[in-house]
Image (cartoon, grey):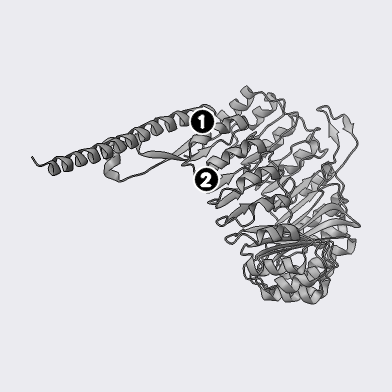
Amino acid sequence: MPSCFRQYRLRTLLLFCTLAAICFGLIRWRVSASYRQHQLANQIVERNGSVRWENWGPDWLNTAFGSFYFRSIIEVNMNHRHIEDDDLKLLREISSLEELNLSTSAVTDRGFIVLYELPRIRELRIEGTNVTNECLKYVGNLRKLESLNIQSTQITEDGLLYLRGMPNLTDLRVNTDAYWKGPFELTDTGIDHLSTLPSYETKSLRCKGLSQESLQWIRDRFTGNKLTLIELQGDAWADFLWDHPTITHLAVYRSAMQDDQLRKMLLANRLTHLYLTEVLVSDAGLVAPEKLTRLKSMSLHGTRMTTSSLFAIYGVHARQLSVIEQAYQDRNASFALRETMHGPEISWDDRFQEDDWKLLEFCPHMQTVVVGSDRKEQKYYDFEGHELEEKMHRTPCQIDDEALEGIVQLPQLMELKLSGLQRVSPSGLTALVNAKDLWSLQLTATGITDEHLKSLSLLGNLKRLDLSENMITDDGMAQLESLQNLESLDVSDCPQLSDESLKSVAKLQSLSTFKAANTSFGDEGLKYLFNMPRLKELWLIKTKATSHGIQKLKNSLPKRKP
């Protein structure tokens, strides 16, 4: 054989052996890597974590050899309070990782050095941890990062410096609502950092003291729907944002605004929710509800709006009025007109005046009136009726006989909810007879007596009655036996009621719900309720009744249809 052919065959053999060695080396590396990833996955699971795998390669390869060798970990969840920095060392060998969730864990800034070895991460969640701006030094190296959640951390806008210019970061989630602990507020510094992110989008922003340059960025780049602005410089912000194309929820605190700017913003008809707090606009900025077809709610606190104007403009379409005690500067009541047929629901604060009840003449469609206290100040008694503490609900807008007379003139009144000490006399309470459509009455902690219950006995159309937290007695309960349409009765926290009053309850043949939490009712009294034809729901928490007695009562009642 010629030497040239022998040389050619040797080269071919050498090439084949080399390729075979490479292939077997890759296979061995893949097998070893697969076993190692499964070991790491088991260790992560042992630490109360979880993983998600993704298959790679063609389907026939997975079918022929099994997916064990042809899948990689792409997501790790270690959102557990016992996860610490040392646990993150397990991630160093998972270079395929794309999503990492460390929320609510005990990791610190030091643990994030592991991110240097995880270049493929697209989504990172660290909300609810104690990390600071230092951790963003490592996060800033994740050039493929698309989503970052830093809610409820110690990170501030200064930390955004390390995220500048990240090419793919689209979703950056921070605390923007006031109910979050430490809401994330952006100043001009933070806006400047965000302006360097070419792909950045967010649903909400919370900003403080912005300059016109930052407002211009919001005007041009902000595509979210929720914006909160605090202590802005001047009133130019309204000119920048009055017709912003995507903002639907706008909250403004302690900032200047002119009446004509408010009117212009409202007439643009883009907002669905508007909140103004300590923004000194007046009635001149209001717009008729018929023109506010998109606006669903408007909250006005610390403004110059007057109660009379708000009733006159928006009361005509409201079905519900609430007047709740509050303590805000010199204002003692929070008003709200809700369930509107046209235009937005309106809430505001003001100093309550007794003449304000006359404004109900602007509310022909009012169906529900709610008057009460926000504070839980009440008298407490033990089961024997001994007073433990001298406190009652206090309300700045106590209802007296004259006010109640005005309320019952509402032609569509269906529900009246009063809480807190009132000044309605027993004879004044008879005015409720004139409310022909009244079916629900709440008198929580209003100071009513047995004499008041005598007046209530005339309300034959009542279906729901709440007498909780009052000093009524068994004799008063006997007055209610005439309420044969009553379906729900609440006598919770009425310490002077005894088992004897349940005789009267048993005569309410339409009753389906009976609430008597924190009362002295016992097993003997519950026997009076046996076999009530429609009784289905019982609330007997913190009573003298035993579980055995309650079960016997339940067994006696009609079975519910499946």
Select label 2 or label 1 by which is in front. 2
Q: Position of residue 329 (x, y in %)?
A: 90, 56
Which residue is the site of mark 2? 119
The answer to whether residue 101 is seen in the rendering is no
> In this image, 350 relative to 556: left or right?
right
C-alpha gap between disc 2 and disc 1: 20 Å
Residue at the location (36% across, 44% down)? 56
Residue at numbered disc 1: 44
Q: Compare residues 360 and 97 and report the one nearer the observer.
A: 97
Question: Which residue is depicted at the point 48% across and 37% down?
Answer: 94
Q: Is residue 7 placed above or below 85 in the rendered structure?
A: below
Residue lying furthest left:
1
Please identify the quadrant where the N terminus is shown.
top left
Pointer 2 with pointer 1, Cβ within 8 A: no
Q: Amino acid at mark 2?
A: Pro
Question: With respect to residue 244, does 516 lie above or below?
Answer: above
